[in-house]
Image: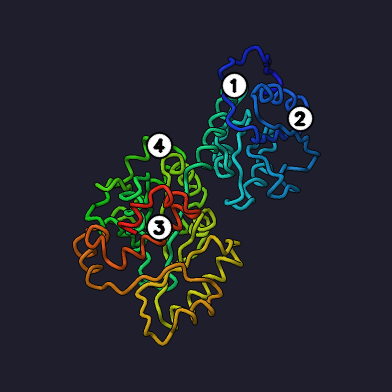
Amino acid sequence: MLNNLSIRKDDVPSAIVQSAASAGFTVMLPSTNRRSLDQLLSIVECIAGINITTKQLKAGEFDPLLHSDAEQQPDLLIYWLDERWQPELTALIEHPVSQRIPIIIVSDCHEQAAMRMAMKAGAIDYLRPPFDSLELQSSINELMNDQNCNEKNVTITSVINAKGGSGASLFSCTLAHMMAKLNEKKVALIDMDIQFGSLCHYFNMDSKYGLIEALQNAFELDEVALEGYMLKHESGLDLLDIKPGDFILPEDIHSEHMDVLLKLMAKKYEHIVVDMPRHLDALSCLVLESSDKVVVVLQQSISHLRDAKRLLDILRNDLGIDKERILVVLNRYDKNNDLSLKDIQKTLNHPVSTTLPNAYKVVSESVNQGVPLYDVASRSPIIKSMHKISNQIIDPDGQESRKKGLFNRLFG
């Protein structure tokens, strides 16, 4: 039990104490046992640069975050569990996946069910007393460093068809390829169509291992192991596709595994592009809610417009995605079409970020040969339009374009 721990601040090496990454990092220590709470506090307060809050739970109170809004929630929860671990972990699991915070569980329970529930609740570590205090401090510092890295570097862009066949997959592949090749960014492309995924064919590659295996092993993966699941394109783009022959139902994949996988990829990549299926479930909603930008691709017809309006309503009203995070792309645009650009924007109550011209010949050549569209026709009108939307995602404030004016004049 934790009550048997004997912790002294002098036991903590100065290198650990000084490795705090952020002065704004907040840790909450809840427990029903005051003595255990004090001993946990004696460990955590040795780490410089963090804010600590404690919460002694009352009898029958299991969720320490019950009355906390988004602004009050800590960055990390270190939860000492007693023999009532089931209702305590159940209360944490009931939080929406997109709103869960990292948790370190401390418990002397050896049951596998407790460990599985802890991971499902978002636990990044599971410590059994007596344990070395350095273990806990190391986990906290690693999380702080990861959080700072993620905040500075990674952006997630999801691309989804408003109606089947609008061109989202080609758009995803072209966008990710251009990001990697022209901007020299570390870019990953994920094929989220777990039943009919085929993005590897756009790059003339074959997938030996894929997304399903990565999701099944998400809790055991690290950055090195993740490499084995990624296809490497010569442009520098990494692709996580679906292995041929794999079949699984979307509801058989726990969204928690996708959350863990995205966080792992956020450590390695600067940009993650996700080609979404036109199917909304717990898994796809998690990815959409986690995205910095959601690109909705439609074409210039009444049926596409109806479906696009419905999809935008779901994204904004049901998933709570801010209007500024949604980019609408009008594919195969024809200015002579009876359905004008102005009519589309008015009906959607949303601006069209860019239009892509009809480029049947070069697109067919790209898809049939398995060669990225940029490599087939780098100076075509469709690529020029792709530059516009790419810049909105990579450099929304225009800082990069001001630094690389010549590059953009030549290729933009």
Quarter of the figure with the C terminus: bottom left
Residue at image position (27%, 72%) is 359
Q: Confirm whether residue 131 shows in the render.
A: no
Q: Which mark is residue 390?
A: 3
- The reply to whether dot 2 and dot 1 touch (C-beta < 8 Å) is no
Task: Give amino acid for label 2.
Answer: Asn
Tag 2 secondary structure? loop
Q: Is residue 60 above or below residue 251?
A: above
Question: How far apart, in angstroms, are the residues tagged by discs 3 and 2?
Answer: 53 Å
Residue at image position (61%, 33%) is 22
Dot 1: few (<14), some (14–19), or many (≥20) neighbours within 10 Å?
few
Task: Give amino acid for label 4.
Answer: Glu
Task: Give amino acid for label 1.
Answer: Gln
Question: How far apart, in angstroms, are the residues tagged by discs 3 and 1?
Answer: 40 Å
Lower position in the chain sequence, tag 2 or tag 1:
1
Residue at image position (33%, 64%) is 384
Question: How far apart, in angstroms, are the residues tagged by discs 2 and 1?
Answer: 30 Å
Q: Quadrant of residue 2?
A: top right
Where does label 2 land, which residue?
A: 33
Where does label 1 land, which residue?
A: 18
Where does label 4 land, which residue?
A: 223
Question: How far apart, in angstroms, are the residues tagged by discs 2 and 4?
Answer: 37 Å
Q: Would you say 59 lies left or right of 48 here?
A: right
